Image (cartoon, rainbow, N blue to C red):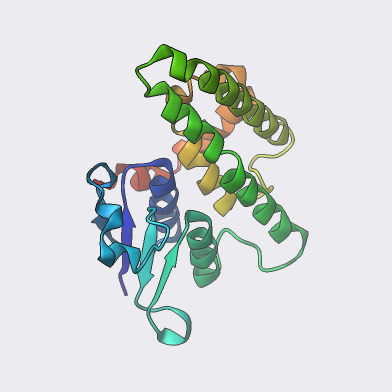
Amino acid sequence: MTIAFFAFDTPNGRKISVALEEMGLPYAVKSINITKDEQFSPEFLAISPNNKIPAIIDPDGPDGQPVSVFESGAILIYLAEKTGKFLPRAGAARIAVIEWLMFQMAGFGPIPGQVHHFIGLDNEDDKRYGLKRFMNETRRLYGVMDKRLAEHDFFAGEISIADFAMLGWVWRHPRHQVDLNDFSNVKRWYEAMMARPGVQRGFSIALK
């Protein structure tokens, strides 16, 4: 059955489009235009009470009953457990995936998201401090990722939902004003990920 995928063309939206394609799940995009405040509609808030995209409705959820899921990390875990793909069922390998997924959710998302915000300000005095603070922290996070990828092909060893989560944000590296040549291991990983057919399909699907 077809999953309803509520999204817009953002890093968090792209995480899920890539995962859906890589997992081979049928889905239909329901665009939520966040530039027009469609995320505040009562219909969408019933699915995503934090008024954020993405969200999904799976008509074939647990026990065959419909289920809605909001928050991109929760959606990735749900889809991985539904399909049995990209998330080990137990042990140290599963822990590693969850660790790096949480690293993305808590840090490498909120921090570069602040860069996006301050870059967009017109007043130079307003944005100077914010950009310095959040660009420095964004580069620190890229450094953590680069060190990890110096010893692993993917963030948790084998490719996983953690990689899909990271990819949505590394995709925006030009907007972070980060040159991937400064982080050679991240660059190698990013190019390998973007060469995958499922990832390419996930980025080509229209989300707005």
Left or right placement of residue 26 versus residue 138 in this view: left
Give the residue displayed 51% in from the left and 59% down from the top. 76
Looking at the rendered image, the quarter that the N terminus falls into is bottom left
Rendered view: 206 above or below 175: below
- From this viewpoint, is residue 159 visible? no
Foreground pick, 60 / 134: 134
Left or right placement of residue 31 versus residue 172 in this view: left
Rendered view: 12 above or below 119: below
Most distant residue in the bottom direction: 63
Task: Tell me where residue 31 appears, x and y as whole percent.
Answer: 25, 53
Task: Tell me where residue 64 appears, x and y as whole percent.
Answer: 41, 85
Rendered view: 120 above or below 85: above
How many numbered marks does the figure carry? Answer: 0
Foreground pick, 4 / 41: 41
Residue 141 picture quarter: top right
Task: Tell me where residue 30 appears, x and y as whole percent.
Answer: 25, 58
Give the residue displayed 39% in from the left and 53% down from the top. 52
Rendered view: 61 above or below 110: below
Give the residue displayed 54% in from the left and 18% down from the top. 129
Residue 42 picture quarter: bottom left
Give the residue displayed 48% in from the left and 35% down from the top. 113
Foreground pick, 156 / 15: 15
Most distant residue in the top direction: 124
Task: Tell me where residue 94 appears, x and y as whole percent.
Answer: 69, 60
